[in-house]
Image (cartoon, grey):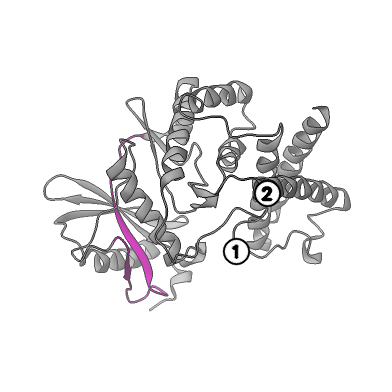
Amino acid sequence: MKPYSTLTVRGQAQRLRRLALAALDHYDLEVKGIKFLTNHLNGIFRLDTRDRQRYILRITLPEGGHTLDHITAEMDWLAVLSRETDLSVPRPVPTRGGKLVVIASAEGVPQPRMCAVFTFLPGKLLAEELTIANITRLGELMANLHNHAEKYSPPQGLQLLHFDQVFPFPDPFVVFEDRFSGFISKDRRAILQNAMNWAQESVDRLISSSEPMRILHADLHQWNVLVYRDRLSPIDFEDLMLGWPVQDLAICFYYLQDLENYNALKDAFQEGYTRHCPWPERVTGEIESFIAARAMDLANFVLNEYNPAWDIDTAEFLERTEKRLVKLIEARRET
């Protein structure tokens, strides 16, 4: 049997399908069809049942660094959101034994994998419908998540990520290592260091405030929201962590910042958000400091995943990152 890593996308999908079927043995679902959707970041299958219902089965890939504690917290919050709110979220489906996470394995697939089944949500990605009205709805959606999170507590004993540092993910910090000096010039390093210091000031301010941390989606942007009949559905809660609402906003804005109508979209988001709760930015530029933090975090992620075959892509990404940071820092100086 060929090693899993040497297989084509189709070959890996066939192996993962066996693992998906092993996971489904734990559920009371009469599945008549299982369709592979993607193996990017996670393995995703669509399930069609005999009673004409649809579900999503997700196989968490071990390379993503997500732990059982993180997935357990994700499933719990989604289950509580489904019960306590009218938000359109993917509802976790329990096994016959009441579990929301299954550990499954299959021959030819390295390592057991965490699996979960969710209700299927219709719609297209918000990225395809970036209207002012939809961004206003996105602001409302995030505000409602933040309001719920203020009262919600994850199950006790779970080790979760905390956004009380510039780099909340467990990846080692490699940006300034000598092996990447070809990508990080002296001038670029100074810009990155400036951004890190700025973000650290904001983190320190939040830590010293009286506001307690709460659970955040921490990855809510136009590629993690579905739009269906003017209703928005957040998906992919896998990166959730404890932090402060202003950080969640900044992550969302990071992915909008290069659009020509960014200011109009930001205003629309704020209008929707403040319909339900106060704007969480205490100091002018606080959001921008965490946009810079997201840029730094992604730069670190890219270098942690470095492959010499991706030299051109890596160089282009870091050049874009530098331009974004320079723009943010210059705007800060003007305020």
Q: Is residue 155 above or below residue 216?
A: below
Quarter of the image holding residue 100? bottom left
Establish if 134 lies above or below 43: above
Amino acid type, callout 1: Pro
At 60% from the left edge and 53% from the top edge, which residue is drawn? 163
| Residue under the point 68% across and 56% down | 300
Q: Residue at x 46, y 66 (%)?
A: 67
Please give left or right for residue 331 compared with residue 145 in the image. right
Q: Residue furthest right?
A: 186
Q: Earlier in the sequence, mark 2 or mark 1?
A: 1
Residue at the spot x=78%, y=30% of the render? 331
Q: Which residue is mark 2?
A: 208
How far across and how far down the image is residue 332, in percent? Answer: 78, 33
Q: Residue 183 location in percent, x, y?
A: 78, 55
- Identify the secondary structure beneath mark 1: loop
Label 2 sits on a secondary structure element that is helix
Q: Is residue 105 above or below residue 334?
A: below
Is residue 185 rendered magenta in the image?
no
The span from disc 2 to disc 1 (Cα, nearest Å) is: 23 Å
Neighbour tally class for label 2: few under 14, some 14-19, many 20 plus, Cα within 10 Å: few
Q: Which mark is residue 170?
A: 1
Would you say residue 107 sits in the magenta stretch?
yes
Contact? badges 2 and 1 (CB < 8 Å):
no
Q: Is residue 248 above or below residue 43?
A: above
Q: Position of residue 153 (x, y in %)?
A: 42, 53
Q: Quarter of the image for the N terminus: give it.
A: bottom left
Query: Would you say 201 lies left or right of 69 here?
Result: right
Q: Position of residue 79 (x, y in %)?
A: 31, 50
Residues shaded magenta: 100-123
Q: Nearer the viewer, residue 97 or 35?
A: 97
> At label 2, which amino acid type do we have?
Ser
